[in-house]
Image: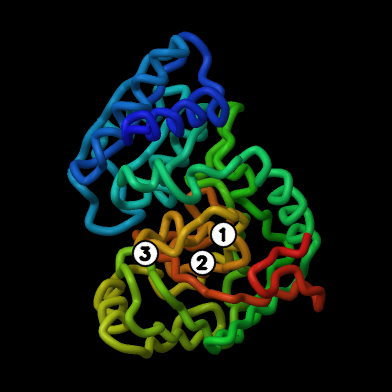
Amino acid sequence: MTTAIEVARTAHRVIADYMAVKPGEVVVLVVDDRTSPSIWQALAAQTLAVGGDPVVTMMAPRAKSGMEPPAPIAAAMCKGNVVIAAASRSMYHIEAKNQAKQAGARGVFNAPYLEDGWIDGAMTADFLEIRKRAERLRDRLARGKRAHVTSPAGTDVTMVIEGRKPVGWLTGVCRNPGEVSAFPGGEVSLPPLEGTTQGRIVLEHIMTDIGRLAQPIVLTVENGECAKIDGGVEARALAAHIEGVKNATNIAELGIGLNPKSRLTGGITEVKKRLGTAHMALGDSAAGYGGAVTSDVHLDGMIMNVRIEIDGEVIAENGEVLV
Protein backbone atom coordinates (compact mmCIF):
# COMPACT_ATOMS: atom_id res chain seq x y z
CA MET A 1 0.00 0.00 0.00
CA THR A 2 1.38 3.39 -0.95
CA THR A 3 1.86 6.16 1.59
CA ALA A 4 -0.75 8.33 -0.14
CA ILE A 5 -3.37 5.61 0.20
CA GLU A 6 -2.55 5.11 3.86
CA VAL A 7 -2.88 8.83 4.60
CA ALA A 8 -6.13 8.91 2.62
CA ARG A 9 -7.52 6.00 4.65
CA THR A 10 -6.90 7.86 7.92
CA ALA A 11 -8.23 11.11 6.46
CA HIS A 12 -11.42 9.34 5.38
CA ARG A 13 -12.08 8.15 8.95
CA VAL A 14 -11.44 11.66 10.23
CA ILE A 15 -13.81 13.37 7.81
CA ALA A 16 -16.54 10.74 7.45
CA ASP A 17 -16.56 9.07 10.88
CA TYR A 18 -15.00 11.31 13.53
CA MET A 19 -16.14 14.70 12.22
CA ALA A 20 -19.18 13.29 10.34
CA VAL A 21 -18.91 16.05 7.73
CA LYS A 22 -22.18 16.63 5.87
CA PRO A 23 -22.72 17.90 2.33
CA GLY A 24 -22.33 21.67 2.17
CA GLU A 25 -20.32 21.99 5.39
CA VAL A 26 -17.18 24.13 5.33
CA VAL A 27 -14.04 22.40 6.67
CA VAL A 28 -11.21 24.80 7.58
CA LEU A 29 -7.77 23.16 7.53
CA VAL A 30 -5.08 25.08 9.41
CA VAL A 31 -1.46 24.16 8.67
CA ASP A 32 1.97 25.74 8.51
CA ASP A 33 4.90 25.26 6.16
CA ARG A 34 6.22 22.37 8.27
CA THR A 35 3.05 20.33 7.77
CA SER A 36 3.38 17.40 5.35
CA PRO A 37 1.38 18.44 2.25
CA SER A 38 -0.11 14.95 1.98
CA ILE A 39 -2.11 15.56 5.18
CA TRP A 40 -4.03 18.63 4.09
CA GLN A 41 -4.32 17.31 0.54
CA ALA A 42 -5.93 14.09 1.77
CA LEU A 43 -8.25 15.91 4.18
CA ALA A 44 -9.33 18.31 1.44
CA ALA A 45 -9.93 15.42 -0.99
CA GLN A 46 -12.00 13.49 1.54
CA THR A 47 -14.02 16.62 2.36
CA LEU A 48 -14.84 17.01 -1.33
CA ALA A 49 -15.72 13.31 -1.53
CA VAL A 50 -18.51 13.70 1.05
CA GLY A 51 -19.79 16.92 -0.51
CA GLY A 52 -18.10 19.34 1.87
CA ASP A 53 -16.22 22.52 1.04
CA PRO A 54 -12.53 22.50 2.13
CA VAL A 55 -10.67 25.73 2.93
CA VAL A 56 -6.90 25.35 3.38
CA THR A 57 -5.13 28.07 5.37
CA MET A 58 -1.34 28.16 5.80
CA MET A 59 0.65 30.28 8.24
CA ALA A 60 4.23 30.65 9.41
CA PRO A 61 5.05 28.31 12.31
CA ARG A 62 4.32 29.85 15.69
CA ALA A 63 7.29 30.33 18.02
CA LYS A 64 5.53 28.53 20.88
CA SER A 65 2.55 26.23 21.31
CA GLY A 66 -0.46 28.24 22.41
CA MET A 67 0.32 31.34 20.33
CA GLU A 68 -2.53 32.81 18.31
CA PRO A 69 -2.79 32.42 14.52
CA PRO A 70 -2.99 35.42 12.16
CA ALA A 71 -6.31 37.25 12.36
CA PRO A 72 -7.60 36.07 8.94
CA ILE A 73 -7.11 32.43 9.97
CA ALA A 74 -8.85 33.03 13.29
CA ALA A 75 -11.76 34.58 11.37
CA ALA A 76 -11.93 31.62 8.99
CA MET A 77 -12.06 29.22 11.94
CA CYS A 78 -15.13 31.05 13.26
CA LYS A 79 -16.85 30.82 9.88
CA GLY A 80 -16.26 27.10 9.37
CA ASN A 81 -18.45 24.21 10.44
CA VAL A 82 -15.39 22.04 11.11
CA VAL A 83 -11.81 23.03 11.97
CA ILE A 84 -8.82 20.68 11.76
CA ALA A 85 -5.50 22.19 12.85
CA ALA A 86 -2.42 20.20 11.88
CA ALA A 87 0.25 22.83 12.46
CA SER A 88 3.65 22.20 14.04
CA ARG A 89 2.62 24.01 17.25
CA SER A 90 -0.52 23.13 19.17
CA MET A 91 -3.49 25.45 18.73
CA TYR A 92 -5.60 23.87 21.45
CA HIS A 93 -4.88 26.45 24.13
CA ILE A 94 -5.64 29.62 22.18
CA GLU A 95 -8.38 32.23 22.30
CA ALA A 96 -9.14 31.69 18.60
CA LYS A 97 -10.24 28.14 19.46
CA ASN A 98 -12.64 29.48 22.09
CA GLN A 99 -14.10 31.94 19.60
CA ALA A 100 -14.56 29.23 16.97
CA LYS A 101 -16.19 26.95 19.53
CA GLN A 102 -18.55 29.72 20.64
CA ALA A 103 -19.42 30.34 16.99
CA GLY A 104 -20.50 26.69 16.72
CA ALA A 105 -17.49 25.19 14.97
CA ARG A 106 -16.44 21.68 15.92
CA GLY A 107 -13.15 19.91 15.38
CA VAL A 108 -9.59 19.26 16.51
CA PHE A 109 -7.08 21.98 17.30
CA ASN A 110 -3.94 19.87 17.60
CA ALA A 111 -3.19 17.05 15.16
CA PRO A 112 0.02 15.38 13.94
CA TYR A 113 1.68 17.58 11.33
CA LEU A 114 4.01 14.96 9.84
CA GLU A 115 2.86 12.27 7.41
CA ASP A 116 4.22 9.41 9.52
CA GLY A 117 1.78 10.30 12.28
CA TRP A 118 -1.15 9.63 9.94
CA ILE A 119 -0.08 6.21 8.67
CA ASP A 120 1.16 4.44 11.79
CA GLY A 121 0.64 4.41 15.53
CA ALA A 122 -2.03 6.26 17.49
CA MET A 123 -3.92 7.73 14.51
CA THR A 124 -4.70 4.18 13.33
CA ALA A 125 -6.56 3.26 16.54
CA ASP A 126 -10.37 3.17 16.74
CA PHE A 127 -11.27 6.46 18.41
CA LEU A 128 -14.90 5.42 18.79
CA GLU A 129 -13.83 2.41 20.87
CA ILE A 130 -11.38 4.49 22.93
CA ARG A 131 -14.18 6.94 23.68
CA LYS A 132 -16.09 4.28 25.64
CA ARG A 133 -13.27 3.97 28.19
CA ALA A 134 -12.73 7.71 28.13
CA GLU A 135 -16.31 8.28 29.22
CA ARG A 136 -15.86 5.90 32.16
CA LEU A 137 -12.64 7.66 33.17
CA ARG A 138 -14.29 11.05 32.81
CA ASP A 139 -17.08 9.99 35.15
CA ARG A 140 -14.61 8.69 37.76
CA LEU A 141 -12.51 11.85 37.70
CA ALA A 142 -15.60 14.03 37.90
CA ARG A 143 -16.49 12.35 41.23
CA GLY A 144 -12.96 12.76 42.58
CA LYS A 145 -11.64 15.22 45.15
CA ARG A 146 -7.88 14.60 45.31
CA ALA A 147 -5.35 13.00 42.98
CA HIS A 148 -1.99 11.48 43.88
CA VAL A 149 0.44 10.81 41.03
CA THR A 150 3.66 8.80 41.43
CA SER A 151 6.20 7.15 39.14
CA PRO A 152 9.38 5.05 39.41
CA ALA A 153 11.37 8.05 38.09
CA GLY A 154 10.48 10.03 41.20
CA THR A 155 7.22 11.84 40.55
CA ASP A 156 5.26 12.28 43.77
CA VAL A 157 2.66 15.00 43.53
CA THR A 158 -0.81 15.66 44.94
CA MET A 159 -3.53 18.04 43.79
CA VAL A 160 -7.16 18.95 44.38
CA ILE A 161 -9.44 18.10 41.45
CA GLU A 162 -12.82 18.58 43.14
CA GLY A 163 -15.15 20.67 41.05
CA ARG A 164 -13.02 20.43 37.91
CA LYS A 165 -14.71 19.09 34.80
CA PRO A 166 -12.62 16.52 32.90
CA VAL A 167 -12.14 17.37 29.23
CA GLY A 168 -10.67 15.54 26.28
CA TRP A 169 -13.03 12.59 26.68
CA LEU A 170 -14.40 13.21 23.18
CA THR A 171 -11.13 11.54 22.07
CA GLY A 172 -11.14 13.10 18.64
CA VAL A 173 -14.82 12.45 17.87
CA CYS A 174 -16.58 15.79 17.26
CA ARG A 175 -19.94 15.48 15.57
CA ASN A 176 -21.95 18.25 17.21
CA PRO A 177 -21.56 22.05 17.11
CA GLY A 178 -19.05 23.35 19.64
CA GLU A 179 -17.38 19.99 20.33
CA VAL A 180 -13.58 20.32 20.31
CA SER A 181 -10.82 17.80 20.84
CA ALA A 182 -7.33 16.86 19.63
CA PHE A 183 -5.70 14.11 17.58
CA PRO A 184 -4.74 11.40 18.06
CA GLY A 185 -7.77 10.49 20.15
CA GLY A 186 -7.00 9.04 23.53
CA GLU A 187 -6.80 11.14 26.69
CA VAL A 188 -8.88 12.52 29.50
CA SER A 189 -7.52 15.52 31.36
CA LEU A 190 -8.39 18.29 33.77
CA PRO A 191 -6.76 21.35 35.35
CA PRO A 192 -5.95 20.96 39.07
CA LEU A 193 -7.47 23.55 41.35
CA GLU A 194 -5.16 26.56 41.32
CA GLY A 195 -2.69 26.70 44.19
CA THR A 196 -3.23 23.11 45.36
CA THR A 197 -0.59 21.07 43.51
CA GLN A 198 2.31 20.09 45.77
CA GLY A 199 5.36 17.88 45.40
CA ARG A 200 7.75 16.79 42.69
CA ILE A 201 7.08 16.12 39.02
CA VAL A 202 9.70 14.22 37.02
CA LEU A 203 9.12 14.69 33.29
CA GLU A 204 10.50 11.97 31.03
CA HIS A 205 11.02 11.20 27.35
CA ILE A 206 9.57 14.35 25.74
CA MET A 207 8.08 17.79 26.40
CA THR A 208 6.17 20.29 24.28
CA ASP A 209 8.46 22.80 22.51
CA ILE A 210 11.55 21.25 24.17
CA GLY A 211 11.56 17.90 22.35
CA ARG A 212 13.16 14.62 23.37
CA LEU A 213 14.68 14.58 26.84
CA ALA A 214 18.15 13.08 27.26
CA GLN A 215 17.70 13.63 31.00
CA PRO A 216 14.50 13.97 33.00
CA ILE A 217 13.31 17.45 33.94
CA VAL A 218 12.51 17.73 37.64
CA LEU A 219 9.93 20.30 38.72
CA THR A 220 9.65 21.24 42.37
CA VAL A 221 6.06 22.36 42.89
CA GLU A 222 4.80 24.56 45.71
CA ASN A 223 1.24 25.85 45.99
CA GLY A 224 0.39 25.14 42.40
CA GLU A 225 3.50 26.74 40.92
CA CYS A 226 6.77 25.37 39.60
CA ALA A 227 9.27 26.84 42.07
CA LYS A 228 12.39 25.17 40.67
CA ILE A 229 13.53 23.40 37.49
CA ASP A 230 16.38 20.86 37.71
CA GLY A 231 18.03 18.57 35.19
CA GLY A 232 20.35 18.82 32.23
CA VAL A 233 20.40 20.73 28.96
CA GLU A 234 16.66 20.34 28.39
CA ALA A 235 15.85 21.66 31.87
CA ARG A 236 17.88 24.78 31.14
CA ALA A 237 16.15 25.11 27.79
CA LEU A 238 12.77 24.94 29.51
CA ALA A 239 13.76 27.60 32.03
CA ALA A 240 14.86 29.88 29.19
CA HIS A 241 11.73 29.10 27.17
CA ILE A 242 9.36 30.25 29.91
CA GLU A 243 11.44 33.10 31.30
CA GLY A 244 9.36 36.26 31.34
CA VAL A 245 6.21 34.47 30.11
CA LYS A 246 3.27 35.40 32.30
CA ASN A 247 1.88 32.51 34.38
CA ALA A 248 4.14 29.97 32.67
CA THR A 249 4.97 28.29 36.01
CA ASN A 250 1.33 27.41 36.74
CA ILE A 251 0.63 23.67 37.01
CA ALA A 252 -2.08 23.56 34.39
CA GLU A 253 -3.09 19.98 33.65
CA LEU A 254 -3.17 16.35 34.60
CA GLY A 255 -3.80 14.19 31.54
CA ILE A 256 -4.18 10.41 31.34
CA GLY A 257 -3.44 8.51 28.12
CA LEU A 258 -5.82 5.89 26.69
CA ASN A 259 -4.57 5.02 23.18
CA PRO A 260 -3.17 1.46 22.91
CA LYS A 261 -1.44 2.16 19.57
CA SER A 262 0.43 5.31 20.62
CA ARG A 263 4.17 5.05 19.92
CA LEU A 264 7.08 6.42 21.94
CA THR A 265 8.05 8.72 19.09
CA GLY A 266 9.63 12.15 19.01
CA GLY A 267 6.24 13.88 18.92
CA ILE A 268 4.46 14.88 22.13
CA THR A 269 1.12 15.00 20.30
CA GLU A 270 1.16 11.20 19.97
CA VAL A 271 3.21 10.16 23.00
CA LYS A 272 0.95 11.87 25.54
CA LYS A 273 -1.98 9.70 24.38
CA ARG A 274 -0.13 6.45 25.20
CA LEU A 275 -2.22 4.06 27.29
CA GLY A 276 -1.32 4.11 30.98
CA THR A 277 0.90 7.20 30.87
CA ALA A 278 0.24 10.63 32.30
CA HIS A 279 1.29 14.10 31.31
CA MET A 280 1.32 17.29 33.30
CA ALA A 281 1.57 20.79 31.92
CA LEU A 282 2.92 24.22 32.70
CA GLY A 283 1.15 27.43 31.75
CA ASP A 284 -2.36 28.02 30.48
CA SER A 285 -5.28 26.22 32.11
CA ALA A 286 -8.05 28.45 30.76
CA ALA A 287 -8.67 28.84 27.00
CA GLY A 288 -11.91 26.89 27.36
CA TYR A 289 -10.15 24.22 29.38
CA GLY A 290 -11.81 24.83 32.72
CA GLY A 291 -9.05 26.48 34.72
CA ALA A 292 -8.59 30.10 35.71
CA VAL A 293 -5.01 30.84 34.57
CA THR A 294 -4.19 32.33 31.18
CA SER A 295 -0.74 32.17 29.64
CA ASP A 296 0.87 32.29 26.21
CA VAL A 297 2.23 28.77 26.68
CA HIS A 298 0.87 25.33 27.53
CA LEU A 299 3.71 22.83 27.78
CA ASP A 300 3.06 19.11 28.33
CA GLY A 301 5.67 16.76 29.77
CA MET A 302 5.43 12.97 30.06
CA ILE A 303 5.29 10.78 33.15
CA MET A 304 5.92 7.12 32.31
CA ASN A 305 4.84 3.97 34.22
CA VAL A 306 2.51 6.17 36.20
CA ARG A 307 0.42 5.26 39.23
CA ILE A 308 -2.61 7.47 39.82
CA GLU A 309 -4.85 7.37 42.86
CA ILE A 310 -8.12 9.26 43.10
CA ASP A 311 -9.26 9.57 46.72
CA GLY A 312 -7.14 6.52 47.53
CA GLU A 313 -8.47 4.35 44.67
CA VAL A 314 -5.85 3.27 42.11
CA ILE A 315 -7.15 4.08 38.63
CA ALA A 316 -3.91 3.71 36.64
CA GLU A 317 -0.88 1.48 37.23
CA ASN A 318 1.65 -0.62 35.30
CA GLY A 319 0.67 0.76 31.90
CA GLU A 320 -3.05 0.16 32.37
CA VAL A 321 -6.05 2.33 33.12
CA LEU A 322 -8.27 0.48 35.59
CA VAL A 323 -11.74 1.81 34.78
| Label annotation for residue 81 | none
Q: CA distance from mark 2 to mark 1?
A: 8 Å
CA distance separating discs 1 and 3: 19 Å
Q: Would you name the residue on which mark 1 appears? A: 291
Name the amino acid, label 1.
Answer: Gly
Q: Residue at x 40, y 42 (%)?
A: 119
Q: Is residue 274 above or below residue 248?
A: above
Residue 176 pos. (x, y %): 61, 27
Q: Does 124 sit above or below residue 316?
A: above
Q: Position of residue 257 (x, y in %)?
A: 59, 60
Residue 208 marker:
3
Whether residue 260 sits left or right of residue 281 in the image: it is right
Residue at the image position 47 percent from the left and 22 percent from the top: 81
Which residue is more in the foreground, 137 or 283? Answer: 137
88 vs 292: above or below: above
Image position of 305 with respect to 259: above or below: below
Residue type for callout 3: Thr
Q: Which mark is residue 252?
A: 2
